[in-house]
Image (cartoon, rainbow, N blue to C red):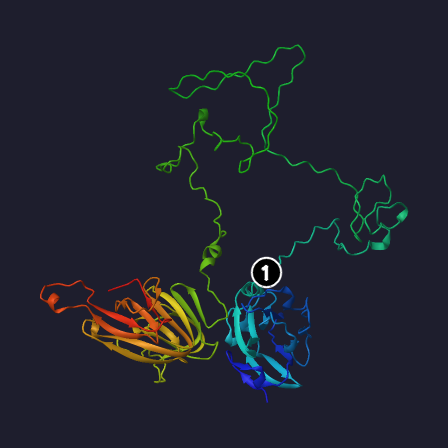
């Protein structure tokens, strides 16, 4: 009996079947939409390092035929044969994807699935519907991935940008299609069609024009026709040459022996200025091509042709002054050129687009974190009020209470309350523009100050510890010990620094962020009896001292109350 997977479910192939020669079938359809179904062979960095492992309709198999495209069969829109024993060691993941060819969104798809069949028996199936997607145009449906052994995961994550965004996510490039060359002739007959009637060519006697492009006679002035194209029409009148606005100096024509014409009288000088002296005639210069960035018809170095009377600049609009440093009459309001990222609203917003990597925790920038609740099906515990936006069907509730709508949580001592995020969708978390740092645990442990915890996976084991002592703000410091497998998001004021623990390591209570679970924490006081006899102190009388074996560490932020 086939196992039914939900999005984010994973399993070892050995738990599903003992075979390695597998059949993968994909069924996806929508009214009026066409889908391209492909398989990407990715390396250990989840990149398409070898284009030969992009399996699609134009490349139906890998070099060693470990992945083969079989086509539509048995009710599947597309199918593949995957032989895991033959997959080369450089390929660590086989990702099966579906993209929309043309306009449309994945929210329009009808119920579909991706299934794995071994030995003629279906062993696993991941079913999906359009309600699980929104504006995506490319979706990663399921993966075979190598983690000690081969495993299968139901992914169900996509990209709005379609195949282009999918290829860029995998490190590939999209080849731009070249525009078709213009076809000769004025008729509506395509260039690959033979001449109508076989005798309409330019050869005498009604002979057909050769298809390989050679003229019928050496002296014929007509160009060679394209391969298999109809004969070119009679030559038309030559087209006029393009007109260039480069100034041309024309010398007046005079008869031999006639006196040269007198130069024209100079224009009158502006009022209040001495008259201009006539300049000697200059030899005519050959026409020059305009320089780069020069408007045709202007001389090099000429900014604006004079347009006012007596060569005076045109004044600006009434009541407006020219910009600082600009000469009078300079044009105002001229665009400054196309910005480096391109023109338009979309180009201006493109650097701030959402980053979708297909992972559970994705930093959007240094201050905003996105968590995908549908990846592993594990709820997330986050600090109350840290949600800034979410997409999908997400419930926020009290951990263990079970009623939605109330965002309350477990108090840990320093006004920290947790909310439980469940469902399917993406949640964006942030708080007071703090720097966010995801920390992934793989069976190890770490202590984090409760004030610096933003969110973490519910799969982690955690307990709240209390460090008491006179002089600590609030009378005690609450910390959280995390152990197990999962991710913690730690927030800091500024960029933190990681320091090794030595016998003389001390840290301020407000500056310390986290430390290794094996470190020993001792409250240290530098207040002496003799010093208490005098008023005032340095402000650094109470600190935390850390002790531990080599390999232990502490994390400190550049912040202090």
**Residue plotted at (56% across, 35% down):** 291
Q: Between residues 371 and 83, which one lies in front from this camera angle?
A: 83
Q: Is residue 485 left or right of residue 477?
A: right
User: Which quarter shows the N terminus?
Assistant: bottom right
Q: Residues within 10 Å of mark 1 (few under 14, many from 20)?
A: some
Q: Position of residue 374 (x, y in %)?
A: 47, 77
Q: Which residue is mark 1?
A: 173
Residue beneath the point at 29% across and 79% down: 465
Q: Residue at x 55, y 37 (%)?
A: 292
Q: Is residue 198 left or right of residue 401?
A: right
Rendering coords of residue 213 (x, y %): 81, 48
Considering depth in this image, is 417 or 235 the residue closer to the camera?
417
Dot 1 falls on a residue whose secondary structure is: loop
Task: Name the quadrant of the C terminus.
Answer: bottom left
Q: Is residue 399 above or below residue 162?
A: below
| Residue 223 shown left or right of residue 457 in the figure | right
* In the displayed structure image, the side of residue 548 where residue 219 appears, left or right: right
Horizontal and vertical percent position of residue 377: 46, 80
Taking the image as drawn, is residue 211 in sight? yes
């Amino acid at each position: 009996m086939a196992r039914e997977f939900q999005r984010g479910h994973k399993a070892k192939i050995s738990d599903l079947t003992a075979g390695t020669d597998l059949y993968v079938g994909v069924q996806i359809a929508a009214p009026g939409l066409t889908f391209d179904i492909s398989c990407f062979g990715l390396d250990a960095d989840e990149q398409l390092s070898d284009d030969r492992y992009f399996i699609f309709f134009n490349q139906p198999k890998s070099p060693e035929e470990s992945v083969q495209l079989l086509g539509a069969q048995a009710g599947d829109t597309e199918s593949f044969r995957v032989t895991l024993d033959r997959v080369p060691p450089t390929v660590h993941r086989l990702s099966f994807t579906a993209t929309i060819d043309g306009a449309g969104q994945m929210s329009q798809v009808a119920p579909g699935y991706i299934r794995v069949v071994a030995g003629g028996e279906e062993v696993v199936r991941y079913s999906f519907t359009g309600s699980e997607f929104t504006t995506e145009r490319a979706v990663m449906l399921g993966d075979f991935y190598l983690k000690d052994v081969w495993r299968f995961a139901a992914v169900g994550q996509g990209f709005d940008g379609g195949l282009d965004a999918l290829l860029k996510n995998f490190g590939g490039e999209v080849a731009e299609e070249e525009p078709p060359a213009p076809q000769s002739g004025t008729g509506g007959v395509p260039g690959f069609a033979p001449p109508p009637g076989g005798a309409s060519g330019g050869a005498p006697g009604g002979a057909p024009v050769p298809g390989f492009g050679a003229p019928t006679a050496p002296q014929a002035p007509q160009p060679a026709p394209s391969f298999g194209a109809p004969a070119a029409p009679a030559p038309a009148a030559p087209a006029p040459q393009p007109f260039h606005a480069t100034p041309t100096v024309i010398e007046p024509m005079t008869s031999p022996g006639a006196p040269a014409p007198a130069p024209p009288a100079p224009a009158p000088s502006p009022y209040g200025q001495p008259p201009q002296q006539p300049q000697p005639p200059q030899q005519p210069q050959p026409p020059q091509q305009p320089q780069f960035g020069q408007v045709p018809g202007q001389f090099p170095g000429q900014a604006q042709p004079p347009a006012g009377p007596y060569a005076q600049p045109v004044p600006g609009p009434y009541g407006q002054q020219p910009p600082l440093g600009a000469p009078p009459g300079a044009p105002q309001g001229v665009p400054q050129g196309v910005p480096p990222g391109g023109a338009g609203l979309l180009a201006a917003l493109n650097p701030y687009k959402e980053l979708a990597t297909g992972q559970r925790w994705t930093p959007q920038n240094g201050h905003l974190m996105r968590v995908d609740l549908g990846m592993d099906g594990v709820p997330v515990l986050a600090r109350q009020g840290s949600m800034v936006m979410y997409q999908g069907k997400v419930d926020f509730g009290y951990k263990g209470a079970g009623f939605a709508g109330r965002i309350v949580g477990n108090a840990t001592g320093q006004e920290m309350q947790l909310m439980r995020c469940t469902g399917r969708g993406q949640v964006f978390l942030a708080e007071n523009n703090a720097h966010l740092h995801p920390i992934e645990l793989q069976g190890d442990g770490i202590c984090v100050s409760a004030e610096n915890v933003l969110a973490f996976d519910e799969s982690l084991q955690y307990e709240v510890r209390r460090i008491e002592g006179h002089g600590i703000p609030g009378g005690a410091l609450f910390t959280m010990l995390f152990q197990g497998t999962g991710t913690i998001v730690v927030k800091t004021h500024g960029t933190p620094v990681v320091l090794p623990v030595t016998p003389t390591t001390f840290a301020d209570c407000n500056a310390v962020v986290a430390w290794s679970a094996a470190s020993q924490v001792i409250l240290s006081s530098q207040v002496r009896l003799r010093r208490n006899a005098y008023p005032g102190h340095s402000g650094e009388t109470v600190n935390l001292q850390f002790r531990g074996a080599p390999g232990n560490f502490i994390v400190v932020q550049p912040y202090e109350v």
